[in-house]
Image (tube, rainbow, N blue to C red):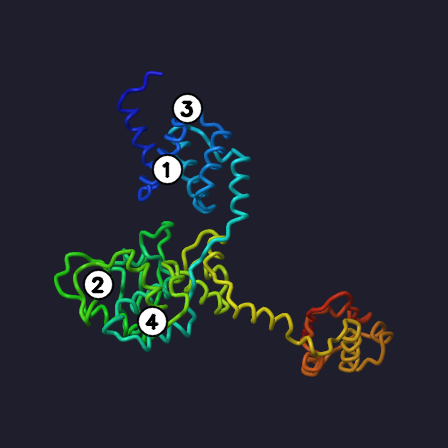
Amino acid sequence: MNIPDHIKKSAEEAVASLLPTKSANRYNDEYKKFIKWCNDNTIIEYSEVVLLAYFKTKSETLKASTLWTTYSMLESTLSIKHNINISKYSKLVAFLKRQNDLYQPKKSQIFTEKQIETFLQTASNEKFSLIKTALIIAISGACRKSELTNLSTDAVQFLEHMLVIKLCDTKNKCNRTFVINNKPWINIVCTYYNLRPPNIDHKRFFIYYCNNKCTRQPVGVNTFGSMPCKIAEFLQLSNAKSFTGHCFRRTSATLLSGKEASFLDVKRHGGWKSSTVAEGYIEDSLHDKITIADQLTSGSSQPSTSCNELSSTVCEKVRHISGVASNEQLASEPTSFNTERLTSVGESVGQITSVALDDVKSGITITNCQHFTINFNINK
């Protein structure tokens, strides 16, 4: 097929843009490593057997999570450069899943609500103003290190009783907005912001702070990654090194889930599209275990009322309130109810709601259940 050169060039540019912009170099580096391994082993065709052998070699030195990252990069690059779809290699996928079964990921520790308040109230502003501000914003918005790094002054809106912060250019292309309305927290952020020197030639919100004054140099991503460890050291926690750069985001998700927020609220808060990823950020805390135990055992010491006993009680209440003495009379006579007196049924028996009047004529039978609702609708 005779394709003009300018069409070929345009197609090549389109293909080059298929890789993620920020990490395209990492994708290409991983692809080059694979090609070099193939050349060293005189391999010219990239089949499932070849990929299995390559990942078997990689598994001897890499963790399962890194293997999956490598797989994802090769999946994209081999598809773009060689039109090979390795996602169809079922044996390769099964091998990676097996490696994942044996892998226990190490996750960052999180701060409790009490530890956060202790740090904010006791740490001196002269030394920790920057870290305090970063902690407040990160916890309030479940921020990543990169999001804190790229936060601009234009994205922070100072209102009378709150701060409104907008996060753009996030990792998963999902813009988020969150609010800080805790007055002491607002004061800490405002105090730090007011120390900014004039005539700064950039709009980065976070700049270095030392001896109660700010410099013009913006804070880098690695500095944010080390902040949780510094907070843990200040609080004299024994495992300070285990508070890594993911700490703020995991802490925020865990605190929100502990406030009985829905899982959808947690996903929206952190901008997670995957439920599996969101679940991975929520710490399986002892407090949650205690709450579950309380829910399982609450009321277990109280004698339970059987369905038959409750059914009999309901019928007796209905007969008493309606002035009918027996089921036979209920079946033969029209049933009339006093709406004011019927309220006593729910007060005496529990929450008794939703049964049609036609069913009442032959009595009420409830079997094989633990929880039910009976409603009385009386039309005057």
The mark nearer the N terminus, 4 or 1, is 1
Q: CA distance from mark 4 to mark 3?
A: 56 Å
Disc 1 designates what residue?
Answer: 30
The mark nearer the N terminus, 4 or 3, is 3
The mark lying in front, picked from 3 and 2, is: 3
- Indicate which disc residue 47 carries: none
Q: Quadrant of the C terminus?
A: bottom right
Disc 2 designates what residue?
Answer: 208
**Cβ atoms at labels 3 and 2 below 8 Å apart:** no
The mark lying in front, picked from 3 and 1, is: 3
The mark nearer the N terminus, 3 or 2, is 3
The mark nearer the N terminus, 2 or 1, is 1
How many residues crowd around disc 3 within 10 Å: few (fewer than 14), some, or many (20 or more)? few
**Cβ atoms at labels 4 and 3 below 8 Å apart:** no
Question: Where does residue 216 sit, x and y in percent of width and height?
Answer: 16, 61
Amino acid at pointer 1: Glu
Image-based side of 205 in relation to 138, left or right: left
- Indicate which disc residue 234 carries: 4
Element type where label 1 sits in the image: helix
Question: Where does residue 275 sit, x and y in percent of width and height?
Answer: 49, 54
